[in-house]
Amino acid sequence: MNSIFKLLVFDWDGTLMDSAQRILNCMKSAASDMEAAPRTDDQFLNIIGLGLNEAIQALYPEEKESFVKGFARAYRRHFLELDPTLSNPFAGTREVLDRLGASGYLLAVATGKARIGLEKVLRSTEMGGLFHASRCADETSSKPDPQMLREIIAHLGVTAEQTLMIGDTEYDMQMSCNAGTHSLAVSYGVHDLSRLLRHRPLGHIDAINELPTWLEKNAL
């Protein structure tokens, strides 16, 4: 086990789960349902990681609250019930989490998903029992606000200095900076690595199965 890090906090979509295509499809379907102004795929992908309301507001800043609520309902309907797009954990994810848990790390999830969405994927992947804590954007403030990360840290009784935030978006890196934790970028998610590196993470990995070796080599 790493001599400094006690808590590893993972983003979910784009870090542990290869779900960008499903999220994109559901956002586009919701936009169609709402007869909303067109947005590019890149614009939709850029908001992955934010809470749903914050994501919609970023895409449609000119729209009123009633539009945001309607869009959110449409998105949830597609994501939870209608969309057939398959999404799976990245190859090696379960094995990595098992190994890290067995090594004594505390594991947690900090995600822009709503609680109902996270619980659904935790059940479908049978990975819920691997995590000691989780926070979702509908329970606290959305990334990059540090509140969800601070709540996990307080709940598990560790310090920010003992915490490593692992994520694929600029919002994860910003949240880590705001909370005073260390961060590690992943290059295989939705934001270009160059965007993540601007926030000075300790490093980056190109696949989730590189994480145990990175931790062993980078004990602080």
Image (spheres, rainbow, N blue to C red):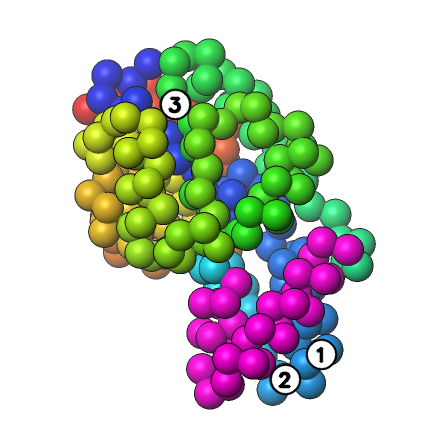
Does any portion of residue 122 appear in the rendered image? Answer: yes
Residue ID at (60%, 68%): 72
| Picture layout, residue 158 above or below residue 65 | above
**Disc 2 target residue:** 36
Q: Secondary structure at mark 3?
A: strand
Q: Is residue 128 magenta?
A: no
Q: Quadrant of residue 166?
A: top left
Q: What is the number of the mark on residue 32? A: 1
From the top left corner, tell me how far across and down residue 95 is, in percent: 57, 21
Residue at the image position 66 percent from the left and 61 percent from the top: 76
Q: CA gap, disc 3 to disc 2?
A: 42 Å
- Which kind of residue does numbered mark 3 sit on? Leu
Residue on which the image places disc 3: 106
Disc 2 vs disc 1: Cβ atoms closer than 8 Å?
Answer: yes
Secondary structure beneath disc 1? helix
Real-space Cα separation, disc 2 to disc 1, in angstroms: 6 Å
Mark 3 vs mark 2: which is more N-terminal? 2
Residue 105 pos. (x, y %): 38, 19
Look at the picture and state if 100 lies above or below 17.
above
Is residue 72 depicted above or below 158 in this figure?
below
Say what secondary structure mark 2 lies in: loop
Instruction: Please state the extent of the stretch shown in magenta in the rendering.
Output: 52-81
The percent position of residue 184, horizontal first and vertical second, equals 33, 39
Q: Residue at x 39, y 23 (%)?
A: 106
